[in-house]
Image (cartoon, grey):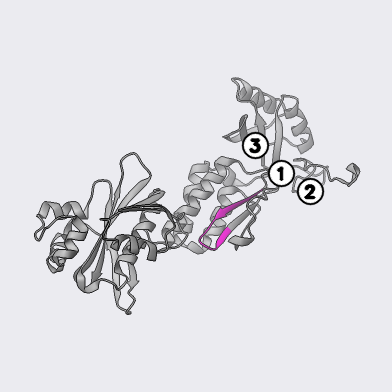
Amino acid sequence: MDARDVPPAPDPVLDWPHTAGEDDPPSVTWRLRIRVDDRPGTLARVAIRLADLGCNILGLTVLPVPGGVLDEVVLRPPIGLTPAQLVTALRGEGCDCVGLVEADLRDLVDAGTAALAAATRAVVDPAHTVDAIREVLAADLVTVVPADEANPGRTEGGHRAVLPLGPARVLVARRRWAPFAQLELARARALAHLMAAVADNASGPVVLTCADGAALVLRLGGPADVDAVAALHGRCSAGTLFRRYHTDTRTVPRRWLQRLLLPPRGLSVLAGCGRDVVGLGQLIPRPGETVAEVSLLVEDAWQRRGVGTGLVRRLAVLAAARGYRELLAVHPPDQDVVRRAVLRAGLPVTAEAEGAVRVTLPAPGAGGG
């Protein structure tokens, strides 16, 4: 291709998405992004130059980027100042203008406040998740596409980004007026993960349908469940208890039951049928690691019906929502009940040794609720 056929790089002024002519009055408010060196006094010089031009600064946000900082300035220009004149003046101060667009009152809200407000609206009505992501990113367009069609490597110079939405869908965001900063994308990913946790109902009960059609409720355990868990142990055979605790035991002290329900820094999930607890799963984080250990106890009458698999799958969802990256299931070498439950849950096994299996957790919202 001849060099003359190559289209020029986008210019923040020439490509400024406004409809008014050059001689028309300017927008009431502009949103400007400039890349500057992270040195003392740089921002002061920019502010002085804007004041010399007669611009009124209404808001300022500083975004760290590789090699410097990105200053986002919301300002009200004087009558007669054109975008080209503003950008030329800032370039004279050694600044690189990467975006200029008309602004509205929402751009004057602190970025953290705006993100929380958008998240609240999305939680109240998950149908607004796409709109919330668009607001957080100040994107021109956000669309939902199948994951296998997203092409995340296509960034278009930072003007296109792909965000996870679930096991089979992603969000594709585009913004013409300025490339996305990593801090903005981190906020958007956090919002996407929050909505995934909402979709997974990470803090509430869910229904588990067993292989024979029986329905159980999986919920978090607490101190009020001590008697029900004690009854669960009473209905379990000596063999089932030995596989869980690796020792002969028939009676469990009440303080031990409380620790089973509320392990240090961890949690428990109960499988309930009416008033009875028929299964108990534990999630126990390892100190200083992003790994959590899982353990299971299912009463004999409910074994081989998918209860253990359902508990493991639910524990994986809750662990991922809490930021853990891996699950570890430890079992006696000659007893692989927990291992089989992990495999049936469909979790990807990353390492397996005698008496232990380690799995990688899916990202929040990637299924398994």
Horizontal side, residue 72 vs residue 88: left or right? left
Foreground residue among 302 and 15: 302
Q: Is residue 290 magenta?
A: no
Q: Which contiguous range is marked in magenta? A: 160-170
Residue 75 circle label? 3
Q: Position of residue 296 (x, y in %)?
A: 26, 60
Q: Is residue 297 above or below residue 192?
A: below
Q: Is residue 144 left or right of residue 292?
A: right
Residue labelled with disc 1: 27
Sequence-first disc among 3 and 1: 1
Task: Give the quarter of the figure containing the C terminus.
Answer: bottom left
Between residues 114 and 137, which one lies in front from this camera angle?
137
Calculate the distance from the C-alpha at mark 2 to the C-alpha at mark 3: 18 Å
Q: Residues within 10 Å of mark 2 (few under 14, many from 20)?
A: few
Instruction: Tell which circle, 2 or 3, labels the residue nearer the N-terminal end.
Output: 2
- x then y, percent, for residue 234: 12, 66
- Residue positioned most to the top: 40
Residue under pointer 2: 20
Q: Quadrant of residue 75?
A: top right
Q: Is residue 71 left or right of residue 263?
A: right
**Label 1 with label 2: CB-CB less than 8 Å:** yes
Q: Nearer the viewer, residue 100 or 150?
A: 150
Relative height, residue 86 to residue 256 (above, below): above
Disc 2 residue type (three-letter): Ala
Give the distance between the C-alpha atoms of the residues marked 3 and 1, in whole angstroms. 10 Å
Q: Quadrant of residue 33?
A: top right
